[in-house]
Image (cartoon, grey):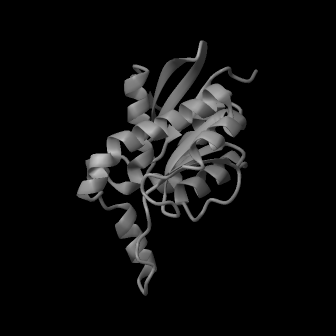
Amino acid sequence: MVSEFWLIVGLGNPGRTYDGTRHNMGFMTADELARRWAVSFSDHKGLAEVGRGIMRLNGGSVKFLLAKPLTFMNDSGDAVSSIATYYSIAVNRIVVIHDDMDLDFGRIKVKAGGSSGGHNGIKSIDRSLGSNAYARVRMGVGHADRGSHARDNVVGWVLGGFDADQRKRLPDYLADGADAAETIVMDGLAQAQEKFNGR
């Protein structure tokens, strides 16, 4: 039987070294959702921190699981597929929140399916689920110099921190990302796209 739960996954890398880095936008947004809905995390098979919550918005309520993989970004799919299988959650009830270098800081795009855009966490999830039909909240972090040492620049960029202006804007931005995930769950993908993609 397919579960009534939604699964919301924030991507990032575990460990203090990576706290506050661009690649951890998903973790930070998941933490915002956890704060809003009083979700406490506990260990799921050493693969992820997972918590349960109930979203109550616009007169409706939805049960959801909130997850932060502990597998490091490139193996995020191991955690996502394990949780989805364990709780019998259908792919179209999964929302993944992640950083995106193709969008400027502060921009959000909501989508389902499509290319991974070179994001290793998304590639891993596509592979593990055998599908890309889940919803994604793409959180812009801007992009590195794509010069002669492009790969090194990209790694340094996503594992780097935010500048002073971005740090000031970050709480509002994370709140918007959390709003986008909530809108997908409560009102559907099309409404979330209409609300966030044009900003």
Viewer-side residue, 73 vs 106: 106
**Relative height, residue 62 to residue 194 (above, below):** above
Q: Is residue 153 visible?
A: yes
**Relative height, residue 115 to residue 136 (above, below):** below
Locate residue 192: give its quadrant: top right
Residue farthest to the right, as pictured: 1
Q: Which residue does the image show at 53% across and 19% down from the upper left?
A: 55
Q: How many marks?
A: 0
Residue farthest to the top, as pictured: 59
Residue farthest to the left, as pictured: 164
Left or right of 120 on screen, residue 129: right
Which part of the image, by quadrant, shows the N terminus?
A: top right
Q: Position of residue 171 (x, y in %)?
A: 33, 40
Left or right of 147 on screen, residue 195: right
Q: Position of residue 67 (x, y in %)?
A: 48, 34
Q: Which residue does the image show at 59% across and 37% down from the upper left?
A: 82
Left or right of 77 on screen, residue 142: left
Viewer-side residue, 19 vs 75: 19
Locate residue 21: give its quadrant: bottom left
Left or right of 70 on screen, residue 134: right
Q: Is residue 87 visible?
A: no
Q: Position of residue 80 (x, y in %)?
A: 57, 40
**Relative height, residue 31 to residue 140 (above, below):** above
Q: Position of residue 40 (x, y in %)?
A: 39, 22
Q: Which residue does the image show at 47% across and 53% down from the upper left?
A: 73
Residue farthest to the bottom, as pictured: 148
